Amino acid sequence: MLIAKQTYTMAEFEAIDRLPQNADKILELIDAEIVEKMASNPYSSLLASKINFYFMAHVMEHDLGYVTGEAGGYHISEKNMFAPDGAFISKEHQPELPHEGFNPIAPDLAVEVVSPTDSYKDVAKKVRTYLQNGTRMVWVFEPETETVTVHTPDGLYTLDIDGELDGGDVLPGFKLPLKNIFGK
């Protein structure tokens, strides 16, 4: 016997996300199903904080746009609302951020830090969904292997701890040696 999965509309998801009992939860809508983003672990959280620190410093110094953390969710498509661990959206793409709810558009660049509770299948699905809906670059940090896979509409490549992230034309001038993230 098959058990039907519960699916939700965007409006239903947003109403559930605003409920008081969900105030301390990070919820995502993935293929119209509500998924609670599980607390990862201190190390994954540290990596996300380091990434967003470097991200924010560069974006603010050059007045390029906005950086958000996982509490700043994005409407990616009709059935998907994601809360990336970090994201950048240019002022050119969105002159001002909304003050409530999920951002109605996809970020220019999304950062996902893989935690032990994440399945690679789900992360891969999210990456595809980001890229199919306007996100121009996705960085997937894998703490266990100390690697980052950079995804763009044109393909992907992986960097190890000796590599350097480059923001390309998505985040002009941004360079980040991965030793600054994975180093002790």
Image (spheres, helix red, strand yellow):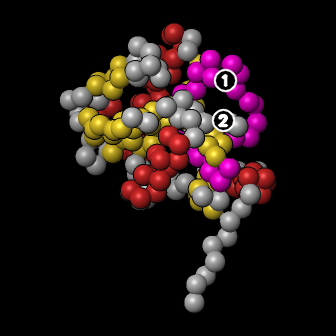
Q: Name the residue under label 1.
A: 94
**Is residue 31 something one can see in this rendering?**
yes
Which labelled disc corresponds to residue 151?
none
**Is residue 57 something one can see in this rendering?**
no
Q: Name the residue under label 2.
A: 105
**Neighbour tally class for label 1: few under 14, some 14-19, many 20 plus, Cα within 10 Å:** some
Tell me, yes or no, whether the highlighted magenta stretch contains residue 66. Answer: no
Q: Whole-Å distance between the Cαs marked 2 and 1?
A: 9 Å
Asked which secondary structure carries label 1, the reply is: loop
**Which is nearer the eye, 79 or 19?**
79
State yes or no: discs 2 and 1 in contact (Cβ < 8 Å): yes
Using the image, determine if residue 73 lies above or below residue 172.
below
Q: Where is residue 125 in the image (x, y as percent from the top left)?
A: 47, 53
* Range of residues picked out in magenta: 78-102
Quarter-wise, where is residue 173 in the image?
A: top left
**Which is nearer the eye, 165 or 105?**
105
Q: Position of residue 150 (x, y in %)?
A: 36, 36
Left or right: residue 122 compared with residue 176: right
The amino acid type of the residue labelled 2 equals Ile
Quarter-wise, where is residue 138 in the image?
A: top left
Q: In which quarter of the image is the C terminus?
A: top left
Q: Which of marks 2 and 1 is nearer the N terminus?
A: 1
Q: Taken as a whole, is the magenta stretch helix, strand or loop?
A: loop
State how many labels appear.
2
Q: Where is residue 35 in the image (x, y as percent from the top left)?
A: 59, 59
Asked which secondary structure carries label 2, the reply is: loop
